[in-house]
Image (cartoon, grey):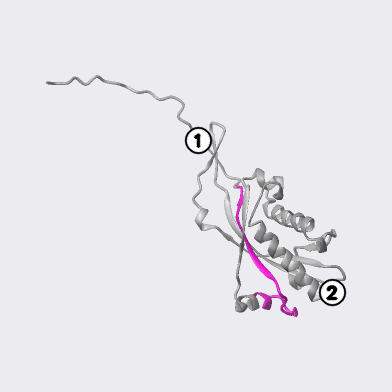
Amino acid sequence: MFTILRDVNETLKVFFRKNISELSEENSITFDSPSNITTTSSPKLSVFLYHIIENTHLRNTEPTPIGLNQMQSPPLIVDLFYLFTPYAQSSETELIILEKVMCMFYDNAILKGEILREDLRKTGNNEIRVVSNNLTFEESNKLWERFPDKPFKLSASYILTPVRIPSGKKKTISRVIEKEIDMYLIEDKK
């Protein structure tokens, strides 16, 4: 039931593998932290989900009716913060990969349709926006300080929003199925 975050990752993996020739190999996309990655002979892209927050702007969505006597609680809506870091034998290849990632997100600022996994679309995730998260140099440094013994690498941060995680909470309700109206004639007193 709870596979939304994994499905977002798989969507990104397929999206990059199809469109970036340097990342066409099966293991070229990793979801590991940059602290767990060592330089490899073949190019890799670290797609690291480093922060998740509840989207407070979309918090008050209405429950969804299920049949005549149940309501599904609204989904938990979150924003996903990703760090995209290329790894390759040469810094030139790393730049090419990062440039292609950025161009793909520029050209596809909204992930929708066939780009998204079917399971995402079934749960109301018909569109996921990709927003550049312009980290300052200081913010970037703070982030990279969390990866001990790893030197700073050029990377890009993006936010994927809104991502809907369905609630498992359902409520039984009684619907109005009949309505009575009493009508009275009001006499005009002239």
Asked whether 30 or 174 is in front, the reply is 30
Q: Secondary structure at mark 1?
A: loop
Which residue sits at x=78%, y=62%? 29
Q: Is residue 183 left or right of residue 55?
A: left
Looking at the picture, how far across and down is residue 125, in whole percent?
A: 63, 48
Residue under numbered circle 1: 173
Decide whether residue 60 is among the magenta residues. Answer: no
Regarding residue 37, the answer to whether it shows in the image is no
Crowding at dot 2, Cα within 10 Å, few <14 / some 14-19 / many 20+, comes out as: few
Residue at 57% in and 32% down? 67
In the image, is residue 145 part of the stretch drawn in magenta? Answer: yes
Residue 73, position as x, y percentages in the image: 55, 45
Residue 6 appears left or right of 65:
right
Residue 45 location, x and y as percent? 77, 66
Question: Compared with residue 15, is residue 158 higher up or lower down, i.e. above or below?
Answer: below
Whether residue 16 is visible here, answered yes or no, is yes
Q: Quadrant of the C terminus?
A: top left
Q: Which numbered marker is on residue 89?
A: 2
Q: Specify the amino acid type for callout 2.
A: Gln
Q: Nearer the viewer, mark 1 or mark 2?
A: 2
**Amino acid tagged 1:** Ile
Residue 6: quadrant of the picture? bottom right
Residue 150 sits in quarter: bottom right
Give the magenta range: 143-166
